[in-house]
Amino acid sequence: MSHAAVPAGAARPVILLRRVVKSYRMGDVEVVALRGVSLTVEPGDFVAIMGASGSGKSTMMNILGCLDVPSKGQFYLDGVDVRTLDEAALSHVRNRKIGFVFQSFNLIPRATARWNVELPMLYMNVSAGERRRRAEAALELVGLADRGRHLPNELSGGQQQRVALARAIVTNPPLVLADEPTGNLDTATSREVMEMFSELNRLGRTVILITHEYDIAAYAKRVVRLRDGLIIDDRREVAVDAPPPQPSAVTAEEHIFSQGVSA
Ligand code: ADP
Ligand code: MG
């Protein structure tokens, strides 16, 4: 990766993977999940990672999220070589720099929506009043200002995932990582959740999400495809600093209509 690839004046990459290899040993068998992956992600990008089951998507996401380390190669997160960090520094990075969203929401069932959103701040030096204020602001951002006192099972799947999104961003991390965030949602709800990701990206956060659905990948500015532990395609659809596309927010018919009235 040459420096010439980064335009003059561009901010440093949020993610820099260089020839990353990840292998797992299972008894006598070595499974190579990533075979030399190089990827640069600039601040403000919105990247969809696609690929068949077993292609290495989750392995890559776990490395990006500092939940696992490469067997070989380099990984810089926001300019920091994560190999130089000890366990305490790594958990600090996970807490401050990264917001995670999972397929299964991972909310605490006995805790209200607001309490779930407050949780990441418990490990930070934030007063109870400030925690509450920030949690309410995050819930408002995802359109759930009036649902703070509800338990997860009193919310729809889409609302639960939006609570998870509020929890992911409440600490104001520059990077949001999501592993199949719409995998458990129907089409309409998936769209609602993807519009939230678009909004976060518009507000300046870098988003990297895994999906195997084209409809979902269409919300991203860039689509990276994995096969057998290698990147086989890396396609930019929209400039990093452009607003994210909103593919299904407007139907073709509505679009023609709105062009007609605004002309
Ligand atoms: P994807 O998310 O694209 O479905 P994964 O990254 O989960 O793919 O898996 C890639 C490959 O690595 C698969 O062959 C999988 O079986 C293997 N793998 C993933 N995690 C482990 C692990 N903890 N131990 C052993 N093999 C693993
Ligand atoms: Mg996976």
Image (cartoon, helix red, strand yellow):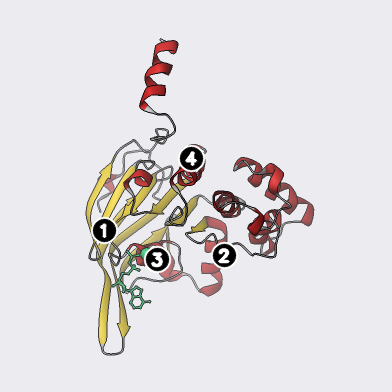
Name the residue beneath numbered marker 1.
226
Q: Earlier in the sequence, mark 1 or mark 2?
A: 2
In the rendered structure, which disc, 2 or 4, sits on the residue that comes first in sequence?
2
Identity of the residue drawn at 42% across and 23% down = 254
Q: Residue at x 46, y 69 (%)?
A: 67
**Where residue 10 sits: x, y (%)?**
38, 40
Q: Which residue is mark 4?
A: 195
Q: Give the Cα distance between marks 1 and 2.
A: 29 Å
Q: Which amino acid, mark 2?
A: His
Instruction: Judge by depth and name the residue closer to the eye, 38 or 23.
Output: 23
Marks 4 and 3, how far apart in space?
26 Å
Q: Which quadrant does the C terminus fall into?
A: top left
Mark 4 and mark 3 residues within 8 Å of each other at the beta carbon: no
Between marks 4 and 3 in the image, the one whose residue lies nearer the viewer: 4
Whichever of labels 1 and 3 marks the residue nearer the N terminus, that label is 3
Mark in front: 2 vs 3: 3
Decide if ligand 1 comes within 8 Å of the CB at mark 2: no
Q: Nearer the viewer, residue 7 or 14?
A: 14
- 71 relative position to 112: left or right: left
Q: Tell me the residue at 38%/46% (across/down).
A: 216
Element type at marker 2?
Answer: helix
Q: Is mark 1 within 8 Å of ligand 1?
A: yes
Position in image of residue 60 (x %, y %): 35, 63
Label 3 sits on residue = 63
How many labels, in total?
4
Kind of element beneath mark 3: helix
Tell me the quarter of the picture where residue 34 sits. bottom left
Left/right placement of residue 158 relative to residue 229 reads right
Q: Circle 2 is placed at which residue position?
A: 92
CA distance separating discs 4 and 1: 24 Å
Seen in the image, is 25 located left or right of residue 110? left
Q: Amino acid at mark 1?
A: Leu
